[in-house]
Image (cartoon, rainbow, N blue to C red):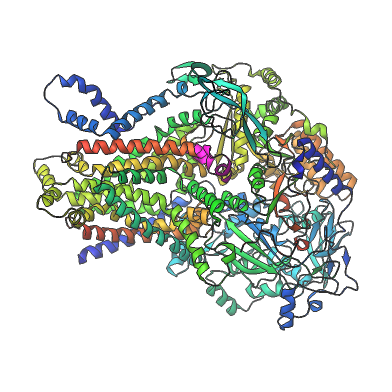
Amino acid sequence: MSEARTDMQAEAMLDHAEAAPRESAAAVASPLRLMWWKFRRHRVAYWSLWFLLFAYFVTATAGFWAPSVPDQRSRQIYAPPQMIHVIGPEGELRAPFVYGYEMTRNLDTLLPEYTRDEDAIYPIRFFVRGEDYRLLGLFTWDVHFFGAPDGYVYLAGTDSFGRDMLTRLIYGAQISLSVGLVSVLLSLVLGLVIGGLSGLYGGWIDSITQRVIEAIIAIPTIPLWLGLAAAVPRDWPPVYQYFAILVVLSLISWTSTARVARGRFLALREQDFVTAARVYGAGQGRIIRRHLVPNIMSYVIVTITLAIPNIIIGETALSFLGVGLRAPTVSWGVLLQEAQRIQTIQFYPWLWIGPALCVIVLVLAFNFVGDGARDAADPFSK
Amino acid sequence: MGSYLVRRSLQMVVIVVIISMVAFFVIQLPPGDFVTSYVSSIAGGDRITQDAVLALRQQFGLDQPMIVQYWRWITNILQGNFGLSFQHQRTVGDLLAERLPLTLAITIPTTIFVYAVAIPIGIYSAVRQYSVGDYLFTFVGFIGLAIPNFLLGIVLIYVSTRYFGGNVGGLFSPEFENAPWSFARVMDVSRNMGLAILIIGTSGTAATMRVMRGMLLDELSQAYVETARAKGLSEWRLILKYPVRVAVSPVLSTVGFTLPAMISGTEITATVLNLPTTGPLLLNAVRSQDMFLAASIILILSILTVIGTFLSDLLLVWADPRIKV
Amino acid sequence: MTGSIFNGSRRRFLQVSAAAAASAAGGARWPVVGGAAAQGLTYSEAPELAELVAAGQLPPVEQRLPATPVVVEPLESMGEYGGTIRTGIIQNRGFQARSAWGPEPILRIAPDNNTIVPNIAEAWEYSDDGRTFILHIRPIRFSDGEPLNAACFEFWWNNVNLNTSLNPAPLSQFVLNGEVPEFEVIDEQTVAWTFSQPHANLPGLLAHWAGSQIPRWLPRHYLEQYHEDFADPAELQTRISEGGFSTWDELFNNHSAAQYQMPFQHVDQPVLLPFKLRDPMNLNTLVADRNPYYWKVDPEGRQLPYINEVVVTNFESGDVRDAAIAAGQMNWVNTDTTFTNLPLYRENAERGNYEARLWQTSRVAEHTIMLNHEVKDEFLRGLFNDIGFKRAFSRAIDRQLIADVVYLGFGVPAQVQMIPGSQWRNEDWVTQDTEYDPDGANAMLDELGLADRNGSGIRLRPDGQPLTLNMDFPVDDPGSTAVGELLIEFMREVGITFNIRPIAREQVRTLIDNNDMEVGIWIADKCSDTMFPHSPEWHVPYLGSTGWNVWGAAYAQHYESNGERGIAPTGDAARVQDLFREMQVTVDEDRRFEIGQEILELNAANLWNIGDVGEVPIPVILGANFRNYPEVGFTSYDWLGNHQYPIEQTYFEGGRWSGEPG
């Protein structure tokens, strides 16, 4: 699967980050460099950017970081997360290790119950050999960043099949950080361009655009998905099918953004700097890109950060109709979907807290980077 | 302005007709038809022979061309008859009369709650950007966004029943279902209602809050704000007077969609609260291709949508004098 | 009491169930419902009804009861009046609500799960060499006091069942090999149907499907006002337009609730059930209270039911319904409860004042995995018709693992044959090719000319493509997803790419109708002695339009359409269809046994269905002080819950559920 770098900001920042030292030789500080300096002053944004870069790196090389492979079952089903210990049973200091589990079924409820097995001490080792995986889609390797070669290690617990949740979360990020974001961006660009043109030109273009938006909003999408699910070739791999669905999704989800962009552009187009740009013969595309979008930069960032959790969670709704991702493909949405059961809430909370935390942290990071970028780009900010 | 209203009204009629046609077509996109879905829902090994299936199609008029079916439906509507739901064997009018009031009774307070909470917090976060409060609201907001509504719903149900003796779903706890109104009953309803609003409103609140914050930040960086500040206007008066009015424009731009969204998007209400709202009615109608029911709800939705966008256009002009229609 | 079943190991559990099954089969614990008609009893009634009588709003109990009320022998003890049954259904599926109301079919399956006993009809007989089926109807009253008689049957048959604007085609259970019988009214309480051959399955059918289709009678006195043949045209037109309908049949269907037999909307609709509608489904709660004209009494002459009312709550989501169970808001649930939720039910039982009992089901296996024998891909078709491939497929499945991972350690390997206790059960056929043997499976596949593999270890078809099987199933069936995920792994072990695709139920229907399925999966139910003779959905491809049999979908279409559609089966598949045709017109019990035997033997020989694990029970949620219900019973969807255990003789000890709110 191709690793789609989707966040334009992040990528742009990355380029500048690399470019910065070389340019410093040239005494003139370019606007981009100024922005980068300003961005670096925003500590939260700066570290969030590094976090995101790291997250993408981990995702791209998921097989190495994950202690197992996502569909590797074990006998430990519904095992709670293990704690990492450094103090042994006799109070002695040891290298980090986890205790093994003893599983018994409660004879009344049949609930699996785990107790710590004090005799089973599984030291955590780094760069261990384990399950085979494909690294970067290029070659097969079996070295994992960490693992417990003597036993097992489940830092995020296991699911109903005894599969390691940490592994599934890491692999799940591959879909959630790539495929979904393409659709976010596509819908954003569509919304800004269509809404922008509608607002800039006004008149009959605006009328038609707005009526189309009304039609799209009023017509429910479910029959569309069901029809599409039947139309997409069944032999396509799940990820392709899902991608096709997402593209269609973005073709209809641009409407809100377009309404907002239009509303703002209706106001902005009357302002002097836009008129000035037009007088100087700037094309509409340029006016949108250089003069109008920067004025709603915060809104654009907000839209992206709101759309990311939406699209990740959106898988859930799609799976419900039988058109989402399906086993054995794993994504955060799939994990959240599997967790929406009252039994999970009561007995196996790690199954939903894990993926929910991942989504929250990811979105927060995007949000902070977005905030930082906005501030950096804003000539008026302090 | 007068000619604008006339033009808009004409456009509204045309678009509603077009939407009703497109919707009628879209409903039938999934494979099969209502009879397929009816037959596949039969439980317990009942038998319907192929002949009966064909006869059923005939009875429901599904064997006719789509245009004929559409004509039959739309002419009935012009006479005030929304037709019959195949699935429920009841009139569409009946079903809607039963569910619409309840839907509005739940969604309107929720919508008010969302705006009442989100807009002030959004303003606060923008003005006090990067304060502790801003980070806190950001964090809480994204928790609300990152957990699917349904999951959030059952987590809250679990917590409330387990630790607060709450009720699973419903506006009334069983002991108050048929009781006369009393203080205890009012408390019971408000508690259940509070939970409902929390479950349904969380993600909307979080989203509106973020949008409000973002727009206001954009607006605060405009030159005129600096100018006004330089002129010595007090900070809060300055902010509330102009930037906030402009910054609510995304809210206003999409406020027109809240009406139709209430009708079509209340599945969570229905699932978590067990209330028969219109959301699942539409969902099931569309899934089972219960055409007249689905098409009628969509017709209502489209009427609400065009009226909604019209109102929101007027509001936009009101809020931001720079906009001309 | 709770959990006694699990005080031992799984083996112990199985022994207990086997014992229960044996006792059930050995002799009727219950003197059959309706067996005795009351003689010389003094009748009494619930205090609520006595008040109404005293107030002059209701005639005395003697006048309300029929001349000879049916006496129901309680399971354990005489009951006490009072209490509320609280049950939850999911997405308004009518058949779930029905079981709580106490369905009253024409005939009834006795609590021994086998014998057919009278109910609304007091007797039935075959005459004229079995070609005429005669039904003697009890002289009982509807909930509004009007009598039930032959006219109600005649009305349904002539004016509803054969009326093409109300009913596109006559009810299939009365249609024998394509022929509609002659109906006649013999006297006030007797009706008869005459076929050209004996309709041997008819009593079984009348005892089942208790209203899951159109009932075989209707309250004529109530419905005539909505029927074109009887009502005054002007009045009818007024009713149609007042109701907002366009045609009279819409109005009639709305009032007859013919699809459900349960009045969900119209409080005035007369019923014969223990409870009648009081508040229609409003705010998703429906209340039914005692039917004052109910026609059954206990041995002391007290009019049934003991329990005051039934509250049915609708849930849009099964998980929220389960949350309500766990929160102690339900005291009677046995539909859509799954064994995998047992930890939830049991863990919260004590706090919720209920117990979760485990009952047996008509599922011989939790799933049947079916390879479409007329799949359009020619190579796959050859493969699926090869018994070697099917045996290899079956042996590649680690059934113990399925039991451990999906079914909480329960379940025993089983092919799709018959449930334990069935007269047709053959242990060899049930267990054949169920042992996990991936090496053997691999060797068998190698022999089939599939020895070549690609770089990923997937076998290659002769056309060079990797061998891929696709399984489609409804997305609303989580059990299939779990088993499907394991199948992916099992098949990978033997070099087959196995894809599972959960899709919308309607889409599955369309795939089956168009013969586009490759592999299907469904719950292997209906494998009990009371279902199999008339509904052998998995063993015989006969159910074309509504069935989910994938292995012979095209054959079923052919059978149902008398050769107009589908594909004509050959060999053994044709033979089982012929046997089923014979079964329907064979009254002789010995011959019926032989027919069943041969059908099952052919199934074993062909392995048309591949089963996973069987003997997985279903949890039944009952209030902690709910009485007169079996400890180990039998329930399933095809039985419409468990209507063989009369709800009217159940009661709450102390007259009230111990967990009653407020």
Query: As rendered, which of C331 and C573 lies closer to the eye?
Result: C331
Query: As rendered, which of C357 and C359 lies closer to the eye?
Result: C357
Q: Residue at x 22, y 50 (%)?
A: A264
Residue ranking furthest to the bottom: C56
Query: Residue A69: x and y, percent?
Result: 52, 24
Q: Which residues are magenta?
A: A333-352
Q: Residue at x 64, y 36 (%)?
A: A112
Query: As rendered, which of C529 and A40 lies closer to the eye?
Result: A40
Question: Is residue B298 found inside the magenta-colored segment of the image?
Answer: no
By secondary structure, the bulk of the magenta-drawn segment is best described as helix
Q: Quadrant of the N terminus of chain A?
A: top left
Query: Residue C222: x and y, percent?
Result: 68, 74
Residue ranking furthest to the front: A91
Name above or below for residue B5 compared with residue A359: below
Please state if B29 lies on the left or on the right of C364 as rendered: left
Please state if C97 lies on the left or on the right of B306 as rendered: right
Name above or below for residue C498 compared with residue C50: above
Name above or below for residue A365 compared with residue C344: above
Query: As rendered, which of C330 and A217 lies closer to the eye?
Result: C330
Query: Residue A284: x and y, percent?
Result: 18, 42
Please state if C30 lies on the left or on the right of C105 as rendered: right
When asked about the image quadrant of residue C444, the answer is top right
Q: Quadrant of the C terminus of chain A?
A: top left
Q: Residue at x 58, y 18 (%)?
A: A150
Name above or below for residue C55 compared with residue A157: below
Asked whether residue A14 is in view, the answer is yes
Question: Is residue A341 found inside the magenta-colored segment of the image?
Answer: yes
Please state if B5 lies on the left or on the right of C214 as rendered: left
Query: Residue A360: x and y, percent?
Result: 40, 39
